[in-house]
Image (spheres, rainbow, N blue to C red):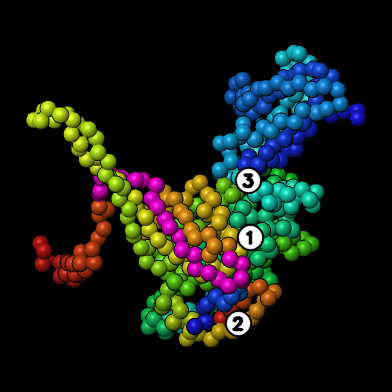
Amino acid sequence: MAITQPLLISELNLAGNPIIAKLYCGDNVSRRWRIIKYIEADPFIQVIYEGSVFTTLDTYAEIDIASIFEELKSISGISVFEFQLNNDDGNFTNYSTQALSIYGGGISKLLQRKLAKMNTNIFTWKLKDNTANFLLSTRTNNDVLAVPENELVPFGFYAKGLKFYIKSDGDTVATFDHLLDQDESLLYIDFAALRESYAGSTNKLVSVFDIVTDTSYSFSVVIIAATEQTEYFLKFRNSWGELEQIALYGLLSFSPTISEATTVSKWDPQVNEFVDRANRPSISNIYTANSGCRSESDRLFIIDMLLSDTKILIANGDEYEVKVTAELPGVVSNAGIPVNVTLNIELIDKDPYYGDLKVESAYQVLTKTTLENITSGDADILV
Amino acid sequence: MILQQHKNIAITAPQFMDMVSALVSYRSFKNDYTLTMANFISFITQPSADRANFLELFNASVIIRNNSYAKVIYS
């Protein structure tokens, strides 16, 4: 095999999955390689990582450089670098080069295998295909993205190279044309805002948005009805590093666990001996909540939430970082019947002290309202 | 009850093709003729028992679309 290209590495990569660089230097030759980032200020380039590689005749050395981009994997976004392989022993004046775009997030091995079988990759299959569902939501990769109205968050997408229209009831609601973009960008579509502004201008309130290209249909976003009001939500970073939201229904039941008190030996001068003294035990704040009835694809979305490293409980507008577990047999059941998944939510903070949050009591609210009514209706009573 | 989930068929949130007449009905439902379109949009886009009652009183037709979800259109 004659090796013509000393450097083989794909330009578009996900930070959470292996990024394989194939390097060739020659027969029993060692060369330096480096990853640089162009910056505007002096000295114009910043060396992110430098390494060396050794190859023998007719073989590429394969290295996985994903761990260099470890910090980029949990949050969506794009970082652009350049990979350089030195062609001689000099100081990177003669080198082979490849631009590297690293996107936040990652995909499962299951999907990687499926894509490999189809001889494609996630960028061609989803993120850069404007005839596919290219939104950074893990609710589904299918062509109907159904979102309950109280879980609707702005959906992100990587815009470079995409051109599409959002249509509803036959009208074009919005147009996106990024075919000629020079740089990659992460943009968002806020369907709730789009729905309201469209209602304001056309007197139609729609819940189905079709995303289409010049020649074909891509996918639909369907806002589905939420039947109950709730003050509790779980916000989390999905596999793409985007924030999504799940509504929790029913009362959040609180079942605190208090750790067993440990003791420490302390010198007691009265008895001239070491005696045991109790430490303060810690409280774990554990809540149980229901996910509400979920379809099969939504239950896979709940699995993505369970796998997330950033989970936040929103309770009455306040946010708390939490750990979440669920009874998995209920989550993965595939009988096609919506299942109410029970989630166990534990606040990250374990605490040896207790501090009550100040919450306005119903009595206080009533009294305040009555007093305000008195003052506003008959202003001189309290003067 | 109009709004419900049945098996895997998700029913869309309310769709109104004529918001002006829907607003008229909303005003009479609330018995408040000063309510604006903005008031109605914020009422109809948030789930509540009141909204469910309003929708039940309103004419509704259900169309199954693509066999994957149902579309509820109020006209």
On what subunit does the disc labeled 1 rest?
A: A
Are dots 3 and 2 on a single chain?
A: no
Vertical side of A30 occupied by A12: above or below: below
Q: Specify which label sits upstream in the sequence, 3 or 1.
A: 3
Q: Which mark is residue A106?
A: 3
Q: Is residue A363 left or right of residue A165?
A: left
Pointer 2 residue: B62
> Residue placed farthest to the right in the image?
A1
Q: Residue at x 77, y 60 (%)?
A: A214
Contact between labelled residues 2 and 3, with CB atoms less than 8 Å apart: no
| Residue A265: x %, y % from top left | 22, 32
Q: CA distance from mark 3 to mark 2?
A: 39 Å
Q: Is residue A121 in view from this perspective?
A: yes
Question: Where is A123 relative to A40, above or below?
Answer: below
Q: Chain of mark 2?
A: B
Rounded to the nearest whole Å, what is the CA distance between mark 2 and mark 1?
24 Å
